[in-house]
Structure formats: C-alpha cells, structure tokens
Amino acid sequence: MTKYRVSMSAPDITEAERQAVADVLNTPVLSMGEQTFEFERAIKEYSGAKHAIAVNSGTAGLHLCVRAAGIRAGDLVLTTPFSFVASSNALLYENAVPVFVDVHMETGNIDPQRLAQAVEQIAAGGKPAQNWLPRKNAVAKKPKAILAVDVFGQPADYDALEDIANKNDLVLIEDSCEALGARYKKKLAGRFGQSAVYAFYPNKQMTTGEGGVIVTNDDEAAEFMRAMRNQGRAPGDTWLEHTHLGYNYRITEMSAALGRAQLNRLDELLAKRDQVAAWYGEHLANVPEVELPAIVPSTTRMSWFVYVIRVAPQIDREKLSALLGEAGIPSRPYFAPIHLQPFMIDRFSYKPGDFPVTEDIGRRGLALPFSGVMSQDDVGLVCDELKKALPKAIT
Ligand SMILES: *Cc1c(COP(=O)(O)O)cnc(C)c1O
C-alpha cells in the first residue's frame, strides 16, 4: 500500500471534543439524552430553524425528509445526477423515481432552466414527457417534489427553484449535507424548502463521526420525523408503543456531544477551510490545464467541503491521479454520475450521454486533498506534484 504524504481529508479535533466525548462516557446515558437535546437546540439556534432533529447519518435524514414529504412508490422527484449517491438513494428507498435534470456547468448544481422545462414538458405529457423519464420502471404523472443538492458547499439557485416549486405545487427538499454554513444571497443553506439536512461524516465541515441533522419549520413534518427516527414512537407513546412503522435513526450521545463541541468551533473550522482553499487558488491560478472551482455571485458565503479541480479535456484524469498517487498524493474522481451507477442502470436503463454536463464535469473533476488541518506546506506539496504530473498525463 502506498504511504501518502498528505491525507485526502481529516477531521479537526481538539481537546474540547475529546473531553466532551469522554464526559458522556462517565455517565450512564449513551442515547436519547441531554447531549442530543442540546445539540438539536444549538443547531436550531445556529440555523434559525424552528425544529432540528438529529439522526445517525445524513442519508437517514434525507430518507425521513422524503417520508415526511409524502413521497411514495412511483412518485416522480426531480433531482440531480451530479451528487453523492445518497441523495437519490433516499428516493429509491421508497421506490420513488428520480427524474434527473442536468446541472449548471459552472456550479454543478441543478440547472433551473432545464428544471422548468422538465416540469413543463412532463405536465404536457406524450413524447416530450417521456424524454425526461428513465427508459423503464417509470410512469408519467405530475411530479411530487424537487430534491436539490448544494454541491461541494455551494448552494443551488433557490430563487429559481422556489419559484418553480411554488408555481407547480412541488415539495422542495434541500440536501445541504455538503453546505453547512454556506449562504445563498445571505440566507443560510439548509433554510430553503420544506426541510433540509446537514451531515457530519468525518470529511464534512464538522463531524460527529457518523450523524446528521434535519432542519425544518414544518411542525407536522418535524413531529413525524422525530417519531420515525425513534422506532415510530409518536408523542405520548411509551417505549413499547409504536404508532408508526419506524426506524432506528437515533444519534448516540457521544456523537451529539462531539457535534456540540464542533459546532462551537464552526466559525474557526470554516475559516481554516477558507484559508486552505485560498492557498490552492494561489498555487493553481496560472496552470492552464486546471480549472479552479467557480463561485457564483449568488453564493455570498462558500462553505468549502472539498476542493475539486477540473482538468482540461486533453488531460487523462486517471493517469494524473495514478501519477499523483505514486508521488504520495491521494486524489479522487468527483462525482461519479449517479445515473451511471450499476444499480441505477439496472433499474432505469440510463445510458452514457443522457446527462452530458454531469458526465463532462464528472469525467474531468478531481478532488485534491482537503481539510482544515492542512498546512500551507501540505498545499504547496500537492500543487508541486500536480504541476509535475500534468505534462505526463497529456493524452
Ligand atoms: C455526505 C452527503 C450525504 C450524507 O452522507 P452520510 O454519509 O449518510 O452522512 C448526503 N448527500 C450528500 C450530497 C453528501 O455529500
């Protein structure tokens, strides 16, 4: 195995976090206690949302949002193929149909113009409607929802998305798992639509080990999701009464305590990531084969999740990644288009070429090592090796 000289990603953990988790272990309460309650309270305060429901992963949070939106088998949900697979999987868990809409070239976020066209043509029916649907296992009907994703920490275009959702009576769900702290026209990511999710896997802006939190202003949805997280126990149910068929999506007290300590440091965590992204920007500004991440004017606060460059078409990305690996620098293709994942092709018969922008940026995107604990020297090392490898990776 190669010994890497820098890590692909790393959590930013201090004594405060270690102490917070150790303190929990000195109590008998390891689930559904004060830490979870206080973590939720802190997220509510931070986000301004009326409700926060902590869960054991971002994926679990998205699944509950899908359930709360009343999305059922066969329902059509407009979403993006350029995302981490969990956003679409949350729909498949309910046998709903992801209707993919290609993305905006600059941001990689769902393209509102294409989305508006999809909604219009699906409503019109016939051949144009069919063109938006997967080749099999989907029946044309009025779509139920939009599931938008804030890709790489940059919010989607919510003015346009909210407008389309309102005009067409679609529920809007925001997958903000990569965008804690980002702002769209000064408004916090995670505050758009009926409900939204932040996620806390160790590579995210802040971590709870595993975990996520749903934020919503919808009282009814919040009560339902709270019950579904905890084996379907509705308010008033005893431990062995289950109003609903629920799940165990509970977060542990250790994770919640870690989350509280990290949230206290969020400004610092985000500032350190800003700095690392800025160093990358300086080192790579004048490398012609490298396109840097674009931040559009509506993003008034970027929350750096990953640092993904796009290589020029003449660069063989796989070769580049292999050369970097040999030099001790890890890197990852980012994202692999969801519609071309084997299980998606199997169920819906998607084909290469179906979503050209997603496929193009999916082919050229390379995530470089990124975290708030990287030093300026680490970034320099990665960029030096990248500049050395690029000429050798020209096809
Ligand atoms: C991280 C992430 C999730 C949730 O991931 P978990 O590992 O389940 O916490 C969901 N959607 C996107 C886009 C993500 O990046």
Image: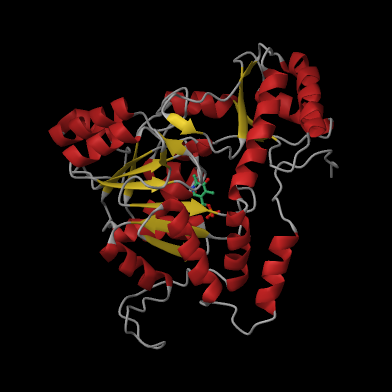
Number of numbered callouts drawn = 0
Q: Residue at x 80, y 33 (%)?
A: 378
Q: Residue at x 17, y 38 (%)?
A: 167
Name the spot of residue 61 as percent of width and height, x first.
44, 58
Name the spot of residue 273 as percent of width and height, x first.
65, 38
Name the spot of residue 352 as percent of width and height, x first.
46, 29
Q: Quadrant of the C terminus?
A: top right
- The way the protein has been coloured in the rendering is secondary structure
Q: Is residue 250 visible?
A: no
Q: Is residue 322 above or below residue 285?
A: below
Q: Is residue 368 visible?
A: yes
Q: Is residue 355 above or below residue 228?
A: above
Q: Is residue 290 or residue 123 the one in the foreground?
A: 290
Name the spot of residue 49 as percent of width and height, x first.
37, 55
Specify whether 159 is left or right of 119.
right
Q: Is residue 321 or residue 386 the one in the foreground?
A: 386
Q: Which of the 4 image quarters holds residue 211?
A: bottom right
Q: Residue at x 43, y 32 (%)?
A: 109
Q: Is residue 31 or residue 279 the one in the foreground?
A: 279
Q: Quadrant of the N terminus?
A: top right
Specify whether 362 is left or right of 63.
right
Q: Residue at x 47, y 22 (%)?
A: 106
